[in-house]
Image (cartoon, coloured by chain):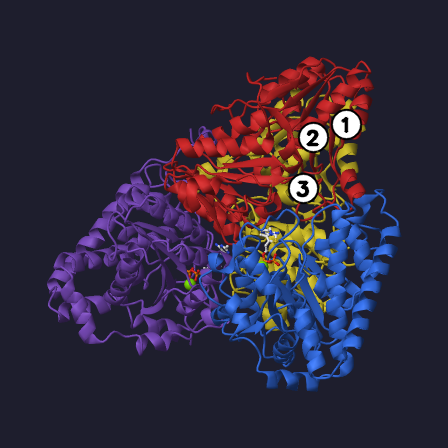
Chain colours: A purple, B blue, C yellow, D red
Amino acid sequence: MPVHTKDVSNELQLDPKIRKQIVQRLSKEKLQKMLEQMFLTRFFEENAEALYMRGLVHGTMHLSIGMEASPIGSIAAIRDDDYILHHHRGHGHTIAKGADITLMMGEFIGKEPGYCRGRGGSMHIADIAGRNLGATGIVGGGLPTAVGIGLALQMKKTDNILLCFFGDGATNEGSFHEALNMAALWKLPIVFICDNNQYGMSMAVERAMTVHHISQRAAAYNIPGVTVDGNDVLAVYDKVSEAAMRARSGEGPTLVENLTYRWRGHSKSDRNLYRTQEEIEEWKQFDPIIRYTGWLQEYKVLSEDEIDSIEQSAKESINKATETALAFPEPTPENLEAEVFAP
Amino acid sequence: MPVHTKDVSNELQLDPKIRKQIVQRLSKEKLQKMLEQMFLTRFFEENAEALYMRGLVHGTMHLSIGMEASPIGSIAAIRDDDYILHHHRGHGHTIAKGADITLMMGEFIGKEPGYCRGRGGSMHIADIAGRNLGATGIVGGGLPTAVGIGLALQMKKTDNILLCFFGDGATNEGSFHEALNMAALWKLPIVFICDNNQYGMSMAVERAMTVHHISQRAAAYNIPGVTVDGNDVLAVYDKVSEAAMRARSGEGPTLVENLTYRWRGHSKSDRNLYRTQEEIEEWKQFDPIIRYTGWLQEYKVLSEDEIDSIEQSAKESINKATETALAFPEPTPENLEAEVFAP
Amino acid sequence: MTNPETKREITMLEAVREALVQEMRRDENVFLIGEDIGVYGGAFGVSKGMQEEFGMERVRDTPISEAGIAGACVGAALMGMRPVGEVMFMDFLTLMMDQLVNQAAKIRVMFGGKVSIPLVMRAPYGSGTGAAAQHCQSLESWFISTPGIKVICPSTPYDAKGLLVSAIRDNNPVVFMENKLLYKAKGFVPEDLYTLPISKGDVKREGKDMTIFSYGVTAQRSLEAAEILAKEGIDIEVIDPRTLKPLDKDLVIQSVSKTGRLLIVHEATKTGGFAGEVTSVVCESEAFDRLDAPIKRLCGLDIPIPYNRTLEKAATPQVEDIVKAARSLAIEGR
Amino acid sequence: MTNPETKREITMLEAVREALVQEMRRDENVFLIGEDIGVYGGAFGVSKGMQEEFGMERVRDTPISEAGIAGACVGAALMGMRPVGEVMFMDFLTLMMDQLVNQAAKIRVMFGGKVSIPLVMRAPYGSGTGAAAQHCQSLESWFISTPGIKVICPSTPYDAKGLLVSAIRDNNPVVFMENKLLYKAKGFVPEDLYTLPISKGDVKREGKDMTIFSYGVTAQRSLEAAEILAKEGIDIEVIDPRTLKPLDKDLVIQSVSKTGRLLIVHEATKTGGFAGEVTSVVCESEAFDRLDAPIKRLCGLDIPIPYNRTLEKAATPQVEDIVKAARSLAIEGR
Ligand SMILES: Cc1ncc(C[n+]2csc(CCOP(=O)(O)OP(=O)(O)O)c2C)c(N)n1
Ligand SMILES: Cc1ncc(C[n+]2csc(CCOP(=O)(O)OP(=O)(O)O)c2C)c(N)n1
Ligand SMILES: [Mg+2]
Ligand SMILES: [Mg+2]
């Protein structure tokens, strides 16, 4: 069993009173939007997976089913005019940042009207206009780039901030170290968010590093580090809100670790030999959507019927987006060399 | 004033009782050898500098005058059959590991009989037979290599260890992070030793990182980290001995930070604009050689006369080595391409 | 073409694994290190099952730390081991460049020839899997231009096994390129351990009208193209250097001297690619005077590899592109 | 040769600084970032005094974190700034390869052309300073073979200033190479801000018997060699591409079509170096038929640069080597 399974089930769980306070601080609209986004992400990926199985997608794909609370809770904590930078497992982040799901699906299938005109694919969805500065397929590759984004935000004297997402495995790359040090040194307006899903491909966190919590690594940069129940969208929202405030007020970066779990294999080629079926089942007990809908009902934010209808409408949106995207035109291979350099 | 000047003058100073115990644990021969090596290093570098001034040396040079206690105290703590890996400022390390000073000087001047046949120069002196695995000119570049050396020592089931040296500036390179993580994870027989001389070129440590002590970075790898008065050769010896024992007994790496100071400029082109003359003078009060000779007399290990004669004989050795090296033959540029690949 | 005396057909992937397994049985200094090479078997399954035989020490999973992996190889090699590193995709060599170029390639000369660095870095490369710009590169030219590193790129299972064994036994750093699309390609491979000489190319098909110089997957495509053109009466010689550095110049010079025409085909981008080097080698040789037409290059477009399958195909030479280029070169200068 | 209308002579180092200073005054989005570029003025003194005028934010000293510096440039460029990074020695680009190659060069295409990355990475390069194997490399061919990056390498103060300004204003990642030995070379440079076109080469000396193609310090050495050979009646045209990528192919083709002979000279290692690319460009052009002799390369030896001064000199083409090579090429094929 990976080191963190117990953490989420026990010590990290929010005190129900605090959770209730968080809910009370938020508007129904906001709480509902988070739920919508969680459903959209889940269904987007289920559809993506189905397309893949049907042979309609060429290439690879990294699903975040079971991890939705981390990107969605985090991004709910910032403003629309703030920025995000994410990584290969970035569907949730993209949806949370307000992407058009049809253009997203178009990119996933590699179509011309897709976000990246079919050049990027699932691993590289960016929505520049939506201030989603894209996804890198290089593990840890976004972290140094984040330094530059933070620097620009600071130098331009904006009050915007950046959320920089990466996985647990990425924290073993040298780029993580260089970026956190520079961001801490210059007090850049960045929140570094680790979607700790317990594995980097087949490597369990405890086989890849000697600290129990990735947030402990914040000590090397003298910045706050916090570990959160990453399957609790409200806890994530709360902790990232604090870190965002810190970043926005010029106090510098925070390292937030959202403990979560990936239900699916790493990518299509994964035979899951490095973990047990029991472990997966155990984590499915912490489905972030089921937990969230439970609380929404408990705190009387939404009724079961309302939730059902949100779920239904998300499913329909995704189905429609998929249909539309499948009908999108293909890009054509003319003049590819001409588009490499910007004029 | 850089952050650490006060540390050395106050809190880090060894309790005299402890220092006395360390002296008592060591043979006179050993204590004398450390002093000899400190003198040899100091005079080697003074001669090197003079040769440079006289235009007899082409290229660059990094002097460690004032820093001798760190490499010499550290390497005194290991066995002859142990290994070291060091960096651009590596004259002291090379002497401490028992190098032939004539071959060293020969390399410094770029002669064929020099350690690296004139191909390496001051920045790359290696004495493979003496288990000094050389110096890299890439800041932090030796750290990943150290992982491989440690791995080989462990896989071959030897009881040898490696001391891996680097500067304070190197700890901001990604390679530092990757290497320490891997070494900690696999409990490699390595002691990581930071010659913290307060600056990476013109960058004061506190302008380059947000932790007060580099040893705090050990927390990110869950290994011991210790800061030592790096101008006290006995304190260095003591702390590195402990870390060496840990490494040798299979408990894994330690991060040792030896606080010291470089009296000379970074290299020849340095105009010292980033620090004050007072600061340099203040640190000269902590001359590791003067401090050590003081204690040796205080604890009646050596008399003033004995010390003088050690000093004299070191000076003569270096002068003689310089003379011999200057008369060494130059390498010839035939068949250079043939030597690139090993047969 | 060298023809192995066996009737056993296995894939390139199996051939690579067999080379690793047999060398590891023979020499305990050989070990594997890389990301997810243990139970996962590596991203492409090359080392599948090997951890069971050799244990976690000798088939060592690492954190995601490419510089660390490369350094681990350099340091172990410095100590006399024979590490075989795996970089998951050749694109991630970007993160190993200091260790490979500034350390591995230079240590020997820099330290006066007193030490050697026998390491192999296996690097799956190339496009065609829909993995887009950051997972599809062919970066051989970086290493070809780095003194002190050898570069090998087999196009058949037979070559892969023999050359990988030689690479492991070689006393220098070797970048061993493995084309992802070829992993499933089958060929005859002897069961016994054997070596093939580094820096010896191979005539994959004899012909008299034109030489195609190619390696990796485009060597296979060139052979297909040659068969198609044979039906049109164009008789193509396909030569595969197998080792890109140091190059078997004699083979190229001899073949071109015979055919008078040279088409160089590779997947890597044209500008700055290996084809320029090969062109120069021929120009500087006696074969220059035997040329009946200018040397032509057919290489990857100067673009980051796109995700979309149609665009991706357009980015590198396919069989039909080779047919077209060779057909046009065949009549040039006549 | 383009001749500036000025009588003011300054060094290449001053020209580079002047370009930076004037662009920073003009455009507040331009900033400098690198190691020891503040009070220290950079390892070679290029930015000496600039922090006083522009402050610590716009002339930003960094920790020793090359990947971080490159990333800072990529991210800032993504946000519409125009960062100018300094890598202390070109050799340390090894530590920036992921950010430059996988991020900077690819982001534009990978994100569907919806963003651009206007960054400049200034890279002092080359040997001759006795800094040995890890501080003397000329790594241009890595970037020439990377789609999405431009490569510039000036050989005069005039070119340096005009091209650096253009590089800063260009909307793409540019590796700007500065030869260390040329920092002290003097030349006429207008005081006003001006630009020179990227991808336009320059005829540094007109001649009719042979073309020498060279850049950086070897372009200057080629000019010296040409003067020596002029006395022997050999009239050499020296062309300097100034931008290595995208290359001004027309200039090369025209010059070679005129002279019929081509010698390519560079400091970078011969094998896999840029000379191969240039050879191919000529072979693929109409100039091929005008060649009176095979194209020759005179380049760096395939070795890590040695420390010893004599060996170091032997490692790269010196004036006398160029004279010898050109003299021999002049009579070849006659
Ligand atoms: C530099 C680099 N190394 C390796 C890979 C291959 N790879 C892709 S995702 C992955 C695992 C990443 O783990 P983590 O950071 O935890 O993210 P997760 O996939 O779990 O979301 C690996 C090894 C890569 N894309 N880039
Ligand atoms: C990767 C790399 N970056 C930059 C340099 C240039 N450089 C050489 S020494 C040095 C300072 C190193 O500082 P530190 O690690 O503290 O060692 P010190 O010189 O103080 O002994 C720098 C920046 C280098 N050699 N390698
Ligand atoms: Mg993970
Ligand atoms: Mg220092």
- Quick check: B165 above or below D102? below
Report if the CB atoms under discs 1 and 2 are less than 8 Å apart: yes
User: Residues under labels 1 and 2: Cα distance?
Assistant: 9 Å
Identified by mark 3, the residue type is Ser
Q: Is residue C234 visible?
A: no
x and y percentages locating residue B77 in the rendered image: 68, 76
x and y percentages locating residue B62 in the rendered image: 67, 55
Q: Which mark, residue B249?
A: none
- Circle nearer the N terminus (1, 2): 2
Task: Characterize the local packing of mark 2: few (<14), some (14-19) or many (20 or more) Cα atoms within 10 angstroms.
Answer: many
Task: Characterize the local packing of mark 3: few (<14), some (14-19) or many (20 or more) Cα atoms within 10 angstroms.
Answer: many
Provide the chain ID for the residue under circle 2. Answer: D
User: Residues under labels 3 and 2: Cα distance?
Assistant: 18 Å
x and y percentages locating residue A93 in the rendered image: 31, 54
Query: From the viewer's perspective, is C323 left or right of D52?
Result: right
Identified by mark 2, the residue type is Thr
Quadrant of the image where one finds ligand 4: bottom right
Label 1: state its secondary structure.
helix
Q: Looking at the image, which residue is at 37% across and 71% down?
A: A280
Q: Which residue bears the numbered disc 1?
A: D322
Label 3: state its secondary structure.
loop
Q: Which residue bears the numbered disc 3?
A: C145
Q: Which mark, residue D218?
A: 2
Dividing the image into 4 quarters, which one contains the N terminus of chain D? top right
x and y percentages locating residue C192 in the rendered image: 74, 61
Q: Nearer the viewer, mark 3 or mark 1?
A: 1
Identified by mark 1, the residue type is Ile
